[in-house]
Image: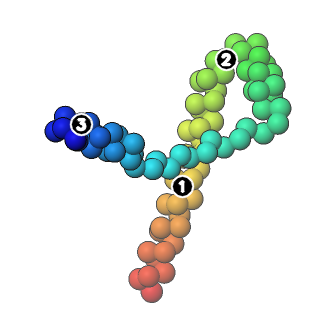
Amino acid sequence: MSESTQNHSFQNEGATKKPAMKRRKKPAKPEGFKEYESLAKSIIEANGRSYYEWLHQRHQEIILEVSVKNQKQVTKALTNKGE
């Protein structure tokens, strides 16, 4: 085997052995999701609001609610630790 043939077969071995990547499965949307999303978007926009602004506001409310709950839990844990 010539040197160029040996290099070529070595390169092919390395190319076929790629590290296995774990793929995350996308969560499945519930049945009828697109239809309800479309209806909600139509209703909100018919009332003169942006659907995406409305959705963004809902996301912020969820984050704030979780943050407040976590803050209360941390405060409670620190208070109990001091006793």
Q: Tag 3 or tag 2, which sits nearer the N-term?
A: 3
Mark 1 neighbour density, 10 Å: few (under 14) some (14–19) many (20 or more): few
Is 75 or 55 nearer to us in this picture?
A: 55
Does dot 3 land on a helix, a strand or a loop? helix
Is 37 or 46 nearer to us in this picture?
A: 37
> Disc 1 vs disc 2: Cβ atoms closer than 8 Å?
no
In this figure, which residue is indicated by the disc labeled 3?
A: 5
Does residue 80 lie above or below 14 as drawn?
Answer: below
Does dot 2 land on a helix, a strand or a loop? loop
Does residue 80 lie above or below 33 as drawn?
Answer: below
Residue at 61%, 45% in the rendered image: 25
Identity of the residue furthest to the front in this view = 1
Identity of the residue furthest to the bottom in this view = 83
Q: Is residue 40 visible?
A: no
Residue at 46%, 48% in the rendered image: 21
Using the image, tell me which numbered label, if any, was put on residue 68. Answer: 1
